[in-house]
Amino acid sequence: MSERTPVRSPAAQAPPFSGGGRLDRAAVEVVDRLALVRDVEAQPHQIEDALWRVESARLAPGDRPGGLIVCGMGGSAIGGDLAAAAVGARRRAPMRTVRRAALEPAISREALVLCASYSGETEETLACFADAGAAGAERVVLTTGGRLAAAARAEGVPVIGVPAGMQPRAAVAYMFVGALECAALCGAAPSLRGEAEEASERLRRLVGEWGPDAPEDALPKRLARRLAGHLPVIYGAAATAAVALRWKTQVNENAKLPAFSAELPEADHNELNAWEGAPGLAPLAAIFLDDGGADDALRRRVALTAREIGAFASALEEVPAFGSTPVERVAAGVLLGDFVSVYLAVLRGVDPTPVEAIERFKRALASAEDAERRLG
């Protein structure tokens, strides 16, 4: 019988929430020892830098009827989702994100495949890069380097460089803008460069309103305190579905908490029924992200869903949209969620940067694969 790692007791887990703690810069820096919050504050600059880096890559434009396929995992994949959300109904060809270690055999040679991996060492993305090449599809790579950049250069595939030194999830603006620009280059979407430039300016102002130097009643600080002691369930609809997923994963990695996301109207056909069983379980907080561009029918549905779930949730928050264009609203939603996740980590006394469980899993997986190869 194989040994099993014992389940850790609650006492061995991270510290409890301190919902009344301060969230000024001094308080944040005590917990955020590797200064992840500064990468969040840098998102306006990241957008500008990403636009320059794509331009510097000198990618050749050309319509691809197969659209854009973004291959990646984790923080490197979310850019594809966010780009598709920002493009929305302006899409001219398919845009999709692949999160697995293989492309489907029927991949169109008429698609542009963007392989995104911050480290350049993501096995799944490396496999998709090879699959796309075997299928004869045009490829572009978005990375800091690693084996992915080396393989791309060896095969003459264009590389969009990303600056090193960040956590992969902190490079979200590079991944978002890279996917947006590639969508325009392959004809899957119109150029949204102007919207991205405006989004950078909007985010610059929002960093002042939401960052650690902002007042204690700033929106992300209030949301973090409201969510303290709860497990978040984040709902999005239309453009905010991808933003909701980003919120979930940031709470997972930064605050080290279980969190969940769902999309409307799909959740009204299943998850809505589950909330009747919520009372008496762990405190659940329902967060609804508004999409400023939603039509009246969708807004009515979201409002009714929030009212229904609010009868059973321990906390309910409806978060407004910020921005006058889809790119602005998506970028601002990401910025807000990133600040909330860092502030939640600070309230818990948990450094938001390390992802020890993920690293531990990667080591265990590599060890298991090595053992299997030796036996084979």
Image: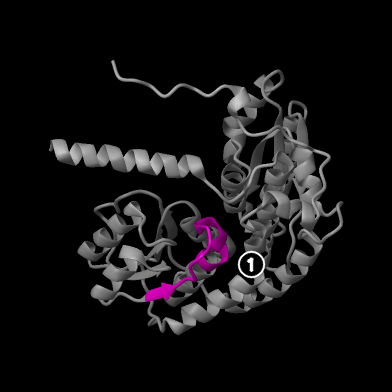
User: Which residue is found at the position 60% from the left and 44% from the top?
Assistant: 248
Q: Residue 238, position in %: x, y?
A: 61, 52
* Pick the front one: 280 or 49: 49
Look at the picture and state if 116 lies above or below 275. Answer: below
Mark 1 lies on a secondary structure that is: helix
Q: Is residue 275 left or right of residue 55?
A: right
The amino acid sitting under disc 1 is Gln
Give above or below for 248 relative to 50. Answer: above
Residue 341: percent from the left, percent from the top? 67, 48
Question: In x, y percent, where is residue 15?
Answer: 68, 33
**In the picture provided, is 1 more to the left or to the right than 362?**
left
Q: Nearer the viewer, residue 219 or 309?
A: 219
Q: Is residue 149 magenta?
A: no
Q: Is residue 102 visible?
A: yes
Residue in the picture at 65% in, 65% down: 326
Q: Which residue is identified by label 1?
A: 43
Q: Residue at x 22, y 37 (%)?
A: 371
Range shown magenta:
159-175
**Residue 116 drawn above or below residue 154:** above
What residue appears at the point 17 percent right and 41 percent down from the top-left corner?
373
Q: How many marks?
A: 1
- Displayed quadrant of residue 365: top left
Q: Which colouring convention does the figure follow?
A: one colour
For this view, does 95 lie left or right of residue 367? right
Q: Dot 1, how many residues are within 10 Å of its Cα: few (below 14), some (14-19), or many (20+)?
A: many
Query: Which residue reaches farthest left?
Result: 376
Expressed as whole percent of the image width and height from the top left, the position of residue 293 reads 69, 59
**In front of the other: 54 or 8:** 8
Assign the N terminus to one quadrant of the image: top left
